[in-house]
Image: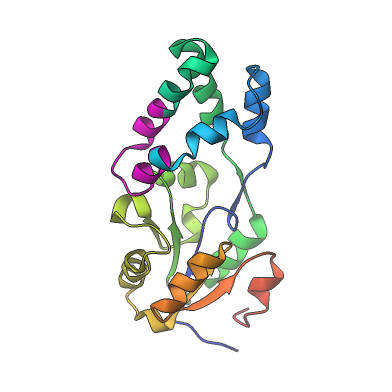
Amino acid sequence: MTTFGAVLCDVDGVLRLWDADAMSTVDREFGLVGGTLAGAAFREARLGPAIVGQVTDAGWRSGVAEDLAEVCGSVERAGEVVAAWTLISGEVDQAVKEILSGLRGKVPVGLVSNATTRLEDDLRALGVMDAVDFVVSSARVGVAKPDAGIYLAAAREAGVPPQECLFIDDTEANIVGARAVGMTGVHYRRIADLTAVGLW
């Protein structure tokens, strides 16, 4: 059995799963070409500042609505598109939640996410806050994965050196970033990737 001083886990793509077609469904509902909403929302000039907390989640979404106004025909219509998108919440992978819950109390367990200022509210609404000890959001610490700063902030929150942390993420670049500061990284693709670590 491998022993770690803390377990740090990504949110999206690991604990929270999204319907890959959800944003395109909103496009279709409003008569937009598929990919229009996602293209506006995830444009680096819009998303980047929101991910590091330079813009609030509400400010980001307001900016997306402004960008969509022309293609939607009006600011009001664009606001309706963004409101429909905002209702999409994702689903919790209960198997991952159970693993994290089982570890809590044995070692510090934290979530580490590139996210907007809305993350904590989303996690409370999804009922996962009781599965972890803390949350480190890029919007709160001002740096995003794979920047070393967010991993070091998570290790400090856990109260252990980076070398004692297990870091789980579905994005390979983020695993590389974690390993660069001394953490053990698990590139997550399926639940077996967690059970194979030997913690459980």
Residue 20 coordinates in the image, percent (x, y):
67, 42
Q: How is the image coloured?
A: rainbow
Would residue 6 be visible to someone looking at this image?
no
Q: Please count the marks in the image.
A: 0
Quadrant of the rendering where the N terminus is positioned: bottom right
Q: In this view, does 154 lie to the left or right of 194?
A: left
Residue 145 coordinates in the image, percent (x, y):
42, 61
Figure check: 187 above or below 14: below
User: Could you tell me which residue is drawn at 46 percent across and 53 percent down?
Assistant: 129
Figure check: 200 above or below 52: below
User: Could you tell me which residue is drawn at 44 percent across and 24 percent down?
Assistant: 67
Is 56 one of the magenta-colored residues? yes
Quadrant of the rendering where the C terminus is positioned: bottom right
Figure check: 145 above or below 49: below
Q: Is the magenta stretch mostly helix, strand or loop?
A: helix
Residue 82 coordinates in the image, percent (x, y):
50, 25
Q: Is residue 25 left or right of residue 36?
A: right
Classify residue 72 by image quadrant.
top right
Is 174 one of the magenta-colored residues? no
Q: Which of 50 and 153 is in front in this view?
A: 50
Would residue 10 be visible to someone looking at this image?
yes
User: Could you tell me which residue is drawn at 40 percent across and 84 percent down?
Assistant: 163
User: Which segment is the magenta one?
Assistant: 46-63
Residue 83 coordinates in the image, percent (x, y):
50, 23
